[in-house]
């Protein structure tokens, strides 16, 4: 019998893409033979917009890349500008950055875990994750005044000190967090249906992970313990004791489990940061008008999705000559076309969800 | 054993049944907002010196200031925020040296018509003499004070779109 493949369009409006993302699937029956991803529907030209803004004014735009972990996006950008200017960030500011950054990572991973559960078909897990994410957002709201787009980092420090009413709910949250993670494990990870859908699906081998320069939980799920906070510590990360969770098989399940384990580790880091929080200024002495010397700088941080790099070129004026972001979601997505081949159409959703992309960041 | 994970999940959801609910019935009940919340802007006209630092700090050119010279001083006649372009980053509030521009806790800023969105914080005519420079007439009804008060009252009550829709 002679059969032929057919083309199925998925997206741009599809709930499991978590935004506007399109995949053109060529199918042989139920099996994918070719996948072509089409990003770019959420492109706002943030890199170009930055060229018409002063160095400080770029910060709110970085919020809008990975809007689930805005603090970390802020951090990537200010780290690059600080490197360019040679600014030494005060210790208290570094500790505050670690606290809010890790809280942001927890919030981002909670969305990743929850939405992955709902992609697979478990709506309950989604609600539990969002219930607890609200608590993190409440905490960050106390600090920055916003719930999602914080714009809290400044070049040379942070905008404001941590308010005193921030600490009691934070301590309570950190105390509850292990049991909350146990709840997610019980609801989602331990669920047989979930395991059947995700185990040994969409396997990324360590070699391919490195070849495609994947990063974050997507790479660590394949068993490579590459975390910038550990291998090339920036800020004050070398002072904290934490583990880098890794997976074994590199399948969707391992990537998912890695995120829950990272939430637990983030809680450990925050606890240590609160205990070691020094007194002192929260802003370095930077001029009011920021005018870095002509030159270029590239700084990297470990965001919740992977390695966020920021490249800033200065021509000596008050506005950056060029800004470029290495967005982890975008780089991780580069492997998707190849990864999908050979899997069934239902697995496409499982694989895409396990990469945990945020379209604001992919399209930038 | 197959099914054990499902039962464990069910046990967790059962337990949740007996905990306190975390949601509130929104329009009737409201969650208290934190001190630093980025709500609608408010401007203390008496403190504002019309320096324009806030307008310069804004990444999106949201703030439009019109000022006129009265005597030796700059007099703020119009302060308009094109709030539809505002990102609520708070750079304008941070740049204000006088503490004139602040965030309020008003979160209801939705409008049914686009032309109602614009936030007019100050809109007042130019006085011939600045209120404080005017010769004291306090004895007979004090026109200076009343004028100052009208400007303030206008800001407090009127021009900012208070009502929704």
Image: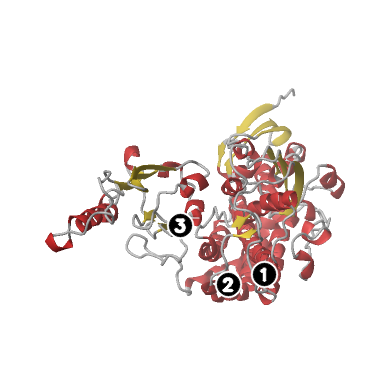
Please say whether residue B134 is visible from this viewpoint.
yes
Q: Which chain carries label 3?
A: B
> Marks 2 and 3: which is nearer the front?
3
Is B153 left, or right, of A173 in this rendering? left
Q: Say which element carries label 3.
A: loop
Q: Mark 2 lies on which chain?
A: A
Q: Earlier in the sequence, mark 2 or mark 1?
A: 2
The residue indicated by pointer 3 is B38
- Percent x, y for residue B161? 30, 48
Tell me if label 2 and label 1 are in contact, CB under 8 Å. Answer: yes
Pointers 2 and 1 within a single chain: yes
Q: From what the image shows, is residue B83 above or below residue A31? A: below
Pointers 2 and 3 within a single chain: no
> In the image, what residue occupies the spot 79% across and 57% down?
A228
Q: Point out which mark residue A170 bears.
A: 2
Q: From what the image shows, is residue A358 above or below residue A161? A: above
């Amino acid at each position: 019998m002679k059969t032929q493949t057919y083309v199925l369009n998925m997206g741009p409006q599809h709930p499991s893409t978590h935004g506007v993302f399109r995949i053109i699937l060529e199918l042989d029956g139920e099996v994918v033979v070719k996948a072509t991803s089409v990003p770019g529907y959420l492109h706002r030209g943030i890199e170009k917009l930055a060229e018409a803004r002063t160095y400080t004014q770029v910060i709110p735009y970085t919020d809008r890349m990975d809007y689930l972990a805005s603090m970390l996006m802020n951090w990537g950008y200010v780290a690059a500008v600080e490197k360019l200017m040679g600014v030494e960030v005060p210790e208290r500011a570094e500790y505050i950055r670690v606290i809010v950054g890790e809280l942001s990572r927890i919030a981002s991973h909670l969305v990743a875990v929850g939405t992955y559960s709902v992609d697979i078909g478990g709506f309950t897990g989604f609600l539990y994750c969002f219930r607890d994410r609200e608590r993190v957002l409440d905490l960050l709201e106390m600090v920055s005044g916003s719930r999602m787009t914080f714009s809290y980092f400044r070049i040379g420090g942070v905008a404001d000190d941590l308010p005193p009413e921030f600490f009691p709910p934070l301590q309570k949250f950190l105390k509850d967090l292990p049991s909350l993670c146990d709840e997610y494990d019980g609801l989602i990870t331990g669920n047989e249906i979930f395991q059947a859908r995700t185990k040994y699906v969409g396997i990324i081998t360590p070699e391919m992970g490195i070849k495609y320069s994947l990063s974050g939980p997507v790479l660590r799920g394949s068993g490579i313990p590459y975390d910038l906070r550990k291998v090339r510590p920036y800020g004050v990360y070398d002072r904290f004791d934490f583990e880098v969770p890794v997976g074994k098989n590199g399948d969707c399940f391992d990537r998912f489990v890695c995120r829950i384990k990272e939430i637990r580790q983030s809680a450990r880091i925050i606890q240590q940061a609160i205990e070691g929080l020094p007194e002192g200024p929260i802003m370095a002495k930077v001029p009011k008008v920021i005018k870095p010397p002509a030159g270029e700088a590239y700084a990297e941080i470990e965001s919740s999705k992977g390695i966020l790099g920021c490249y800033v070129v200065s021509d000596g004026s008050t506005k950056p000559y060029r800004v470029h972001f290495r967005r982890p979601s975008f780089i991780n997505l580069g492997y998707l076309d190849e990864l999908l081949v050979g899997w069934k159409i239902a697995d496409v959703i499982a694989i895409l969800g396990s990469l945990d992309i945020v379209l604001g960041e992919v399209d930038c | 054993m197959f099914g054990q994970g499902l039962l464990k999940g069910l046990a967790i959801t059962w337990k949740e049944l007996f905990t306190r609910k975390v949601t509130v019935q929104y329009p009737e009940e409201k969650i208290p907002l934190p001190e630093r919340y980025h709500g609608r802007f408010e401007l203390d006209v008496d403190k504002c010196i019309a320096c324009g630092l806030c307008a310069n700090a804004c990444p999106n050119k949201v703030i439009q200031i019109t000022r006129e010279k009265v005597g030796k001083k700059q007099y703020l006649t119009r302060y308009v925020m094109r709030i539809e372009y505002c990102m609520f980053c708070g750079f304008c509030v941070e740049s204000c040296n006088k503490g004139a521009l602040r965030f309020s806790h008003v979160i209801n800023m939705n409008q049914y018509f686009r032309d109602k969105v614009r936030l007019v914080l100050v809109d007042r005519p130019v006085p011939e003499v600045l209120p404080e420079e005017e010769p004291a007439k306090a004895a007979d009804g004090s026109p200076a004070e009343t004028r100052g008060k009208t400007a303030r009252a206008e800001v407090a009550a009127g021009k900012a779109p208070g009502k929704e829709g």
